[in-house]
Image: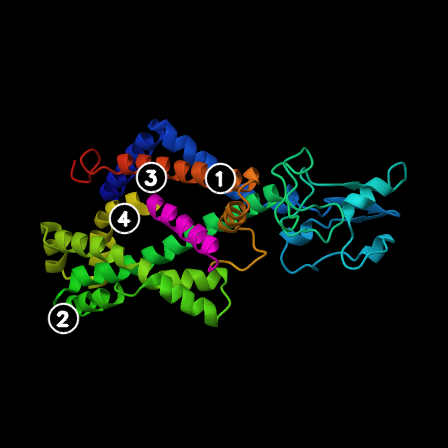
Amino acid sequence: MSNQLNISESINKKRWRKFKSIKRGYYSFIIIISLYVLSFLLPLFVNSKALIVKYEGEYFFPALIDVIPGTNSYLDASLFNQDIPGEANYRYLQEDWEGTSNWIIMPIYPYNPYEDITNNENKMFESPTFKHWLGTDNTGRDVFSRMCYAFNISISFAFLLTVVNYIIGISIGGAMGYYGGKFDLFFQRLIEVWSSLPMLFVVIIISSILKPSFTLLIFIYTLVNWIFLTYYMRAEFYREKSKDYVSAAISMGQSNAKIIFRHILPNSLVPVITYFPFSVVGGIVILVSLDFLGFGLPPPTPSWGQILYIGLANITKWWMVFSPIMAQFFTLLCIVFIGEAVREAFDPKIYSRLR
């Protein structure tokens, strides 16, 4: 048992060294992971709510409301003696309190992705300036802040969709390959019928009945996206099941669960692991395409697809087209580089348990 663990550890170390040696993939991995982790802290960096407010000797932390779940939605403007409905305008307060004992610390970029033309400061289709780094859209919303929040939504959607697809596809495909017989035949026929569904029409029909949401879109695309993985896992399980070590495990009386999870599955995951980054790319493209067509996340949710749609409908507003295209290009390019590095690191011709 210890020898098997040492061999596995040695193989994994070799794979990790190989992955790190492919610089474009390794650095792309660091960049994407770092940006994704930081995107969960965006309310502290890109937000119209103040980080710290000192007012008449009391301290308030409005931006933490967006970070810590279960807190109040906002601080009312009347709390700071501001005569406007709803939440306080902290940028105005920062200007009004200059030279007084009250003070405000704002985020680095003091605009949020939902703040539209109803705020007197914002204008429709304002070109990029020092104030609005990537300009504003057709409702006066800041494009840079929407791009940042859309990055988090896009990566989260693609990652969750891929993970759910992998769990379902590996489970069903592995069972088909291991048990075979009528079980395999039944699921083959089911998959053939299920895969023939016109997915776009299904999305359109469901979107016309139910309001699209993050969870609903993942559920809809999970219905068919797991199918391609079953073919890989079925073939891998069939191949591994015919090998001598599985026959030895069966002759020793080990249970099916132990044979599957301890012996066959670890040796069958290489093809699907190498495909994982490319599946994430597919998930991002799916969400952007749906948002562009109007069947994705409902407005005003930040979305690259919606920004691109507005840009193409107003082609003279170059920043509305340039921003989402470049964001998608660099994100997908980094993930493809990661996929290439993972594929090289898990190449069975170089690193194998049998070597």
What is the spatial separation of the Cα atoms under label 2 and label 4, in whole angstroms?
Answer: 25 Å
Pick the residue in front: 172 or 222: 222
Q: Residue at x 21, y 62 (%)?
A: 175
Q: Give the residue at mark 1.
A: 327
x then y, percent, for residue 9: 29, 39
24 versus 132 height, above or below: above
- Mark 1 closeness class: few <14, some 14–19, many ≥20 residues within 10 Å: some
Read off the magenta span: 277-295
Residue 288, horizontal then vertical, whole percent: 45, 50
Distance of label 3 from label 2 (alpha carbons): 36 Å
From this viewpoint, is residue 254 visible? no
What's the amino acid at mark 3?
Gly
Residue identifier under label 2 = 182
Q: Which residue, given by chain and number where applicable, does mark 4 sit on?
A: 272
Q: Quadrant of residue 92?
A: top right
Give the mark nearest the N terminus, 2 or 4: 2
Q: Which mark is residue 339?
A: 3
Tell me the amino acid under the disc marked 2.
Lys
Q: Is residue 9 left or right of residue 35?
A: left
